[in-house]
Image (tube, rainbow, N blue to C red):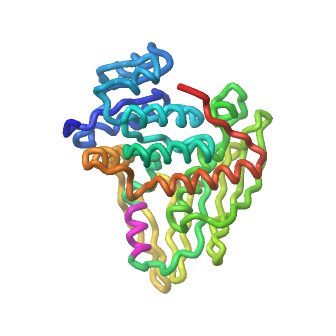
């Protein structure tokens, strides 16, 4: 493999449009190919972003010998088949969150990643934001004592449209997989894997979840209280409670520029750590450096955490009566 890590973009949609713009601030990484089921769409994306090759099928980019890493930004149910095919072809992966549509699908991908020794990471950019890195360092240093509870919310108001991907069950629609993954991953990062998940919410007529409130019980008094919604806007804030203080993560907590530290008996302290570029650069660096070094996963966003988060999302979906499924093939 060359020193430069060559990237392929799979699924030239809204999120890919944002992520690809951060490559210029990432040393030693370059997008060289893009794939869509529509060649015209792939060619248009390639032209907009100066990418050399456009593929009219996902299978073609998986087979492209000049691509080292695939960034998968298709709808959630398509991640599973794409990831399995890429791993069999020896392609490293950055897979958008939610990692898959189902817990079983995530387990299959993780199992094959471990079997093949190919690098795979979920694209949870929150964990790599400089402000969140600073928060974790403060917590590790005992700034707020032992973390006992986490609160987080993330929601947007979207008019119901059964033709829109967000409301289409077959395309992994619903609040949990699109927005709930952020609040669950944030809590899991700080508290670990819960022993019990209790979920309540409502559904759209299409069978996708409109909103959900989750209580994560860790069995020792530690809890997370989480909210997500496509029915109404929520502030997008988080708060981490410790035994000697707390940390506020102002909106939007999943890509903050600052945090506010409240130590017991002291004035609040604002700590500002803006991201590089639009904030996607940090996860691109993590993957590129990991692949270059021959690592098989990220220490910041490990596969075990991805599985834990997917399990919570799956448990919550089941309690709400939502039935997600993986797409059968590329």
The verdict on residue 137 being magenta is yes
**Image position, residue 322 (x, y; %):** 74, 43
Quadrant housing residue 49:
top left
Quadrant occupied by the N terminus = top left
Q: Is residue 160 left or right of residue 235?
A: right
The verdict on residue 18 being magenta is no
User: For the point 73% across and 40% down, which residue is it?
Assistant: 323
Of 298 and 28, the residue lying toward us: 298
Q: Residue furthest left?
A: 3
**Image position, residue 245 (x, y; %):** 51, 79
Quadrant housing residue 172:
top right
Q: Please determine whether, in this image, residue 130 is positioned above or below residue 79.
A: below
Q: Is residue 281 left or right of residue 223?
A: left
**Image position, residue 249 (x, y; %):** 50, 62
Of 272 and 15, the residue lying toward us: 15
Q: Which residues are magenta?
A: 132-140
Of 324 and 127, the residue lying toward us: 324
SS majority, magenta: helix
User: For the point 34% across and 46% down, which residue is it?
Assistant: 287
Q: Residue furthest front?
A: 115
């Amino acid at each position: 493999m060359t020193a430069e890590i060559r990237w392929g973009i799979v699924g030239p949609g809204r999120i890919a449009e944002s992520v690809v713009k951060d490559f210029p601030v990432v040393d030693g990484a370059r997008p060289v190919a893009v794939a869509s089921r529509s060649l015209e769409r792939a060619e248009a994306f390639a032209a907009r972003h100066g990418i050399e090759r456009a593929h009219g099928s996902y299978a073609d980019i998986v087979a492209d010998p000049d691509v080292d890493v695939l960034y998968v930004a298709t709808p959630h149910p398509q991640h599973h088949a794409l990831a399995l095919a890429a791993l069999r072809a020896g392609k490293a992966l950055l897979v958008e969150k939610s990692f898959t549509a189902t817990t079983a699908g995530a387990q299959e991908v993780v199992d094959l990643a471990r079997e093949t020794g190919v690098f795979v990471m979920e694209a949870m950019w929150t964990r790599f934001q400089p402000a969140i890195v600073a928060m974790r360092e403060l917590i590790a240093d005992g700034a707020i004592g032992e973390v006992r509870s986490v609160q987080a919310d993330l929601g947007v108001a979207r008019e119901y449209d059964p033709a829109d991907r967000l409301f289409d069950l077959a395309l992994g629609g619903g609040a949990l997989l699109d927005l709930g993954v952020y609040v669950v991953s944030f809590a899991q990062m700080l508290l670990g894997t819960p022993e019990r998940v209790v979920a309540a919410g409502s559904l759209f007529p299409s069978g996708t979840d409109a909103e959900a409130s989750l209580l994560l019980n860790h069995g020792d008094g530690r809890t997370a209280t989480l909210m997500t919604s496509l029915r109404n806007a929520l502030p997008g804030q988080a708060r981490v409670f410790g035994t000697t203080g707390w940390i506020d993560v102002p909106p939007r907590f999943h890509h903050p520029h600052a945090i506010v530290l409240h130590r017991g008996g002291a004035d609040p302290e604002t700590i500002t750590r803006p991201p590089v570029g639009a904030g996607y650069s940090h996860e691109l660096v993590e993957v590129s450096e990991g692949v270059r070094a021959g690592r098989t996963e990220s220490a910041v966003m490990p596969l075990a955490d991805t599985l834990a988060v997917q399990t919570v999302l799956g448990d919550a979906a089941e309690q709400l009566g939502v039935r997600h499924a993986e797409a059968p093939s590329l």
